[in-house]
């Protein structure tokens, strides 16, 4: 997991070939419709726009993905995200859903990180994360970056 201010995102573009496309997209992005997917590079790189009500820690399940890296960007509100190494999770809520590229775990996060507006967090497949912890409305975008590059 990586977390930092959006003003420092340029420091992380070398970590994946498509991170530079994320950086370019952020320069001109205007939030439109919650739930809408915007395809930047087909299913290799897309972004989901979201406005959700925050939830308490007990209601936020850890999740993980196999195919995608998540870059979660908080635009408004104060979000907290729980984290735990995927190798340490042993209580899946259900089997991995290949079609949605997600698995949920009942395990507890080991750490909680605040992601205030103007900040981001990067979660690789080995990072279980429990997003949307907070009070009130949280406006965010989630980039889905394919792990493998074709």
Image (cartoon, grey):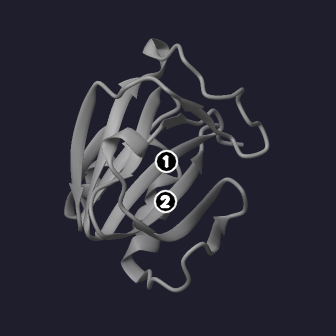
Report the residue marked by disc 2: 142
**Left-right relation of 147 to 77:** right
In the rendered view, tell whether residue 96 sits above or below residue 7.
above
Q: Which mark is residue 53?
A: none
What x and y, as percent, mark residue 101?
68, 41
What x and y, as percent, mark residue 41?
66, 63
Which element is circle 1 on? Answer: strand
- Pointer 2 and pointer 1: residues touching (CB < 8 Å)? yes
Residue at the image position 43 percent from the left and 13 percent from the top: 88
Report the residue marked by disc 1: 70
In the rendered view, tell whether residue 69 sits above or below residue 137.
above
Q: In which quarter of the image is the N terminus?
A: top left
Asked where in the image residue 123 lies, by quadrant, the reply is top left
In the rendered view, tell whether residue 96 sits above or below residue 77.
above
Residue at the image position 56 percent from the left and 83 percent from the top: 33
In the rendered view, tell whether residue 36 sits above or below residue 126.
below
Q: Between 110 and 65, which is closer to the camera in this rendering?
A: 110
Q: Between 70 and 128, which is closer to the camera in this rendering?
A: 128
Which element is circle 2 on? Answer: strand
What x and y, as percent, mark residue 15?
41, 40
């Amino acid at each position: 997991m990586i977390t930092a201010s959006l003003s420092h995102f340029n420091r992380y573009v070398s970590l994946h070939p498509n991170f530079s496309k994320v950086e370019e997209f952020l320069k001109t992005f205007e939030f439109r419709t919650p739930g809408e997917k915007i395809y930047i590079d087909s299913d290799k790189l897309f972004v989901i726009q979201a406005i959700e009500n925050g939830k308490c820690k007990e209601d936020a399940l850890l999740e993980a993905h196999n195919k995608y890296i998540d870059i979660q960007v908080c635009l408004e509100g104060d979000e907290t995200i729980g984290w735990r190494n995927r190798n340490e999770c042993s209580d899946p809520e259900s089997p991995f859903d290949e079609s949605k590229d997600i698995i949920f775990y009942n395990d507890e996060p080991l750490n909680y990180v605040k992601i205030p507006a103007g900040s981001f967090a990067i979660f690789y497949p080995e990072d279980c994360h429990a997003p949307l912890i907070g009070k009130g409305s949280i406006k965010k975008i989630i980039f889905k970056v394919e792990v493998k590059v074709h």
